[in-house]
Image (spheres, rainbow, N blue to C red):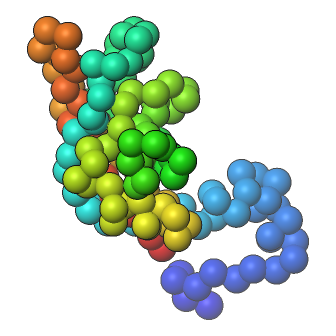
């Protein structure tokens, strides 16, 4: 057997499940495909400004579809890993990304730049498609 082969038996699958699950098994096969660089819109409307102290360059953020949003049918909210809302993706960037999320694709956002200008917090992010 070569080093590039994966052999799974019933016992191996059970052991993998007990030691971090199938997700841990496929992580080496996953890749992030860069899609777009954009920013988080609506940061001035966030009431609890302390949320911006919790993030730093390099942090992963969660993207969550809000199809019932009355202002944008393709709305995608941006959250910290702890579940606090930072704002939304800009409306101009939403349609394709929303369709990818709606189709069950996994997107990740990573903080590229973070700066404060008065009452405005500029959060520049890159969005990637997770594929394997």
Quadrant of the drawing holding the N terminus: bottom right
Q: Is residue 56 above or below residue 102?
A: above
Residue 126 shows in this picture: no
Q: Nearer the viewer, residue 61 or 57?
A: 61
Q: Is residue 87 above or below residue 6?
A: above
Residue at 76% in and 62% down: 16
Residue at the farthest front position = 70
Q: Is residue 75 above or below residue 1?
A: above
Quarter assignment of residue 111: top left
Residue at 43% in and 10% down: 48
Question: Residue 62: x, y in percent?
Answer: 47, 42
Q: Give left or right: position of 121 versus 30.
A: left
Question: Residue 26: x, y in percent?
Answer: 58, 67
Residue at 19% in and 26% down: 122
Q: Nearer the viewer, residue 50 or 6?
A: 50
Question: Residue 114: x, y in percent?
Answer: 21, 25
Q: Nearer the viewer, residue 70 or 75?
A: 70
Q: How many numbered circles are shown? A: 0
Question: Residue 103: x, y in percent?
Answer: 52, 70
Q: Is residue 19 above or below residue 54?
A: below
Residue at the farthest bottom position = 1
Residue at 38% in and 48% down: 72
Q: Give left or right: position of 115 versus 53.
A: left
Residue 9 shows in this picture: yes
């Amino acid at each position: 057997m070569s080093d590039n082969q994966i052999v799974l038996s019933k016992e191996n699958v059970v052991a993998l499940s007990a030691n971090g699950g199938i997700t841990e098994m496929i992580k080496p096969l996953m890749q992030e495909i860069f899609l777009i660089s954009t920013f988080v819109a609506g940061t001035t409307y966030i009431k609890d400004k302390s949320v911006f102290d919790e993030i730093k360059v390099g942090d992963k953020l969660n993207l969550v579809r809000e199809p019932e949003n009355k202002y944008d049918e393709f709305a995608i909210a941006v959250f910290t890993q702890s579940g606090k809302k930072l704002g939304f993706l800009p409306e101009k960037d939403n349609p394709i990304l929303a369709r990818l999320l709606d189709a069950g694709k996994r997107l990740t956002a990573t903080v590229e730049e973070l700066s404060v200008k008065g009452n405005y917090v500029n959060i520049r992010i890159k969005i990637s498609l997770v594929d394997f």
